[in-house]
Structures are given as C-alpha cells and as structure tokens.
Amino acid sequence: FPYTTLFRSFIATATPNGSWVDAAGVEAFVRSGPNFRYQVLGQLESGTVIEPVGRTEDSSWILIRFGDGFAWLRDAWLI
C-alpha cells in the first residue's frame, strides 16, 4: 500500500485517560496500518494499558503509542 493510503481514513480524536487491552487470554497483535494485511509490529498481552491517539473513520482500528512510535490495534481487543 502506498504511504498516502495509510492515513486516508484517519480521524484525530481526543485522547482518553487510558484504555485496557483485553485479548481474552491471548496476545493482541499491533500492526503498521489499520488492516490485517499490514505488517505485525509486535504483541500486547491481555491487561496492558495503552494510550489511544486516534482511530479509523469507522472506529474499527485504534491508533496507539507503541514503542518509540505508533501502531494500529483492532478495536475488538479494547475494553
């Protein structure tokens, strides 16, 4: 995917105080873009506190701070 498509449907949102990852006992993959086709950058264990900084237009993927940058997490893992 060209770099310009990565943020085409990105909407900046107010940052909540914090959210939890609930991966139902398994690890949640974080990706380089808001789709399962993007590269896996790492995993978050269930119960990990994350800092959401944005979302896709349909709210199905959440942009989070991850390491020294950002990554995308499927909204199904958030509680």
Image (cartoon, rainbow, N blue to C red):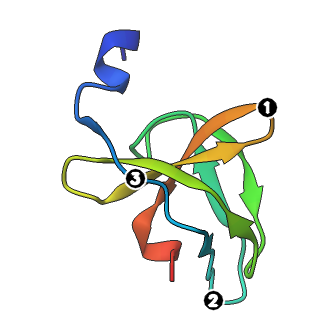
* Residue 58, x across and y down, in percent: 19, 55
Image quarter in which the N terminus is found: top left
In whole angstroms, how far apart are the C-alphas of marks 2 and 3?
Answer: 27 Å
Name which residue type carries label 3. Ala
Name which residue type carries label 2. Ala
From this viewpoint, is residue 2 visible? Answer: no
Label 2 neighbour load within 10 Å: few <14, some 14-19, many 20+ = few
Per the image, the residue denoted by label 2 is 24
Confirm or deny contact between disc 2 and disc 3 (CB under 8 A). no
| Residue under the image location 71 percent in, 44 percent down | 66
Whether 6 is drawn above or below 16: the answer is above
Q: Which mark is residue 14?
A: 3
Q: Which secondary structure, mark 1?
A: loop
Whether 46 is drawn above or below 72: the answer is below
| Residue under the image location 24 percent in, 25 percent down | 8
Query: Which of the pair 53/67 is nearer the observer?
Result: 53
Among the two numbered marks 1 and 3 on one chain, the one whose residue lies closer to the N terminus = 3
Direction from residue 75 to residue 64 in the image, left or right: right
Direction from residue 71 to residue 25 in the image, left or right: right
Label 1 neighbour load within 10 Å: few <14, some 14-19, many 20+ = few
Q: Quadrant of residue 24?
A: bottom right
Q: Which one is closest to the eye, mark 2 or mark 3? A: 3
Among the two numbered marks 2 and 3 on one chain, the one whose residue lies closer to the N terminus = 3
Per the image, the residue denoted by label 1 is 68
* Residue 26, x across and y down, in percent: 71, 79
Q: Which secondary structure, mark 2?
A: loop
Q: Which one is closest to the eye, mark 1 or mark 3? A: 3
| Residue under the image location 78 percent in, 72 percent down | 45
Q: Quadrant of residue 21?
A: bottom right
From this viewpoint, is residue 7 visible? Answer: yes
Whether 17 is drawn above or below 7: the answer is below
